[in-house]
Amino acid sequence: MEFLQNIDIATVAIQFVVLLFSLSIHEASHAWMADRMGDYTARYMGRVTLNPVPHIDPVGTILFPLLMFFTSIPIIGWAKPVPVNPAHLRNPRKDNIYISMAGPGSNLLAGSIAFVLILILKIFNPELILEFFRLIPGNDSVLTPVVAILYYLFLINFALALFNCIPIPPLDGHWVLYGLLPDNAAVALERVGRYGFLIIYALMFLGILKYIFIPIYEMSGLLIPS
């Protein structure tokens, strides 16, 4: 009971909703780009949408993120992968690069918009930002949840973008690398795919993975009023 009392349910709810939205942006962008490249499979399955329902994976989108929020254990969340049929693509290896980067690119755009909006609020209402970061005492403003939503939009979208750019299967970055490598090297990378999750978790628990998030830490510091 004491553990549950220490949990900020409102913050967890905001983080979870933002994560659902951010994953939907990511997968919908994959589906939209695949459709632009000639593969209509995802569009026919209703995946070109920001509605999170078609993108939800019960374990990766619901269970694992909730475990992470409530236990602080580093767990990777994910949505249902967008199906791509290479037979419908005009240039499969090249088109796959665009399709793969559409997801991280959309997260980067969403996170950047949220970041800029917080910077604007910092200029015109620095006390509100200070309240959110709990650097001054007092009651929360009614606008504090807005700052929280923007902050987690920035944080989660940038984290998704940077994480997915890692060139390890099954992350998006590996498809980009696959499309750029010579045939022999691409085949070797494909063989590594079965061990991708093991490699990712090994990097995570060894503490190596945290270094890709350094830009997020640096940018977060810019949001705190001096």
Image: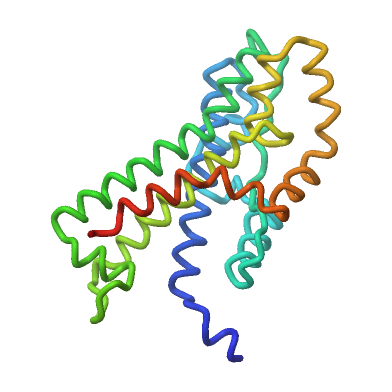
The correct choice, above or below, for 97 with respect to 106 in the image is: above
Q: Between 36 and 65, which is closer to the camera in this rendering?
A: 65
Residue at x-position 52% and y-position 39%: 161
- Residue 48 placement (x, y as % from top left): 52, 34
Q: Observer-nearest residue: 134 or 173? A: 134
Q: Quadrant of the C terminus?
A: bottom left
Name the residue at 65% across, 60% down: 74
Identify the residue at horizontal 78%, vertical 10% (top origin). 183
For the residue pair 127 and 97, the one nearer the viewer reads as 127
Examine the image and state in which quarter residue 94 appears.
top right
- Give the residue at the far bottom of this rendering: 1
Above or below residue 107? Residue 99 is above
Q: Is residue 47 left or right of residue 119?
A: right
Find the residue positioned furthest to the left.
124
Q: Give the mark count.
A: 0
Q: Nearer the viewer, residue 108 or 126?
A: 126
Q: Residue at x 25, y 80 (%)?
A: 137
Q: Quadrant of the N terminus?
A: bottom right
* 14 with respect to 99 (left or right): left
Q: Position of residue 131 (x, y in %)?
A: 27, 71
Q: Position of residue 134 (x, y in %)?
A: 32, 73
Q: Is 54 positioned to the left or the right of 127 in the image?
A: right
Q: Is residue 152 above or below residue 157?
A: below
Q: How is the image coloured?
A: rainbow
Q: Quadrant of residue 66?
A: bottom right
